[in-house]
Structures are given as structure tokens and as C-alpha cells.
Amino acid sequence: MLSNSHSFVQPADTAERACLEALVRANYDRSHPGDAFDDMKRRMSFSREDQGLYRDWMALAAARAQSARAARPRPTAA
């Protein structure tokens, strides 16, 4: 997992950010009882810990998205 503050995921637009967040939102909510992904996002503006958590969860989301793209069958030209 990326934890270096200089190595983080920068989605191209809000649609890509939403897609990446959707890949990890349920896992975050399940692993942090009493806390929600959106709560952590709201705290990011004033909490370095939450900024780091978000960065790490987004790195996981990017890795999952890359794995999913690699696993998709590619059409072959005939």
C-alpha cells in the first residue's frame, strides 16, 4: 500500500474518483464499524490521519481497477 505522501492516486475527473471510491467504500465501512467512508472524507480537510487513510484506500482502489482491466478479455482481430 502506498504511504509516501508523494505517491498517490490522482483521478482524472470526478467520475473516475467516484468509480475508484465505489471499489473500496463497502470494504472501508465494513472494516471501520461506527464510521463511514464519507465521514472520513469529510474529516480529511483537517485531519492528516484521515488524509493518509484516504490516500491508502484510493491506492488500493487503483490497484483493484488495474487488476480488473488486466483480467478483462481483449477482443482479437480476425
Image (cartoon, grey):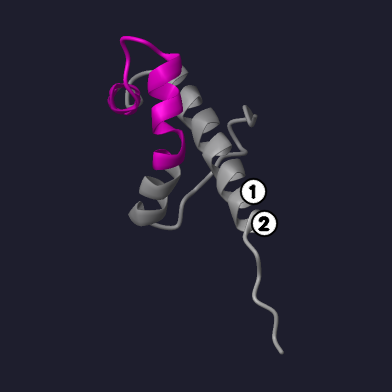
Circle 1: element type = helix
Which amino acid type is shown beneath numbered disc 1? Ser
User: In the figure, is residue 52 to the left or right of 18?
Assistant: right
Decide if residue 6 is on the left or right side of residue 39: right
Within the image, what quadrant is residue 74 found in?
A: bottom right
Rendered residue at 46%/51% (across/down): 11
Of all residues, the one furthest to the top in this rendering is: 34
Main secondary-structure element of the magenta-colored stretch: helix
Q: Which mark is residue 67?
A: 1
CA gap between label 1 and label 2 equals: 5 Å
Q: Which residue in the rendered view is the most extreme toward the bottom?
A: 78
Picture residue at 34% right of the left edge, 53% below the top? 14
Q: Position of residue 42 (x, y in %)?
A: 28, 26
> Which labelled disc corresponds to residue 70?
2
Label 2: which secondary element? helix
Q: Residue furthest front?
A: 78
The one nearer the camera, 47 or 78, is: 78
| Residue 77 drawn at (x, y percent) | 70, 86
Residues in magenta, as a range:
21-42
Viewer-proximal residue among 27 and 50: 27
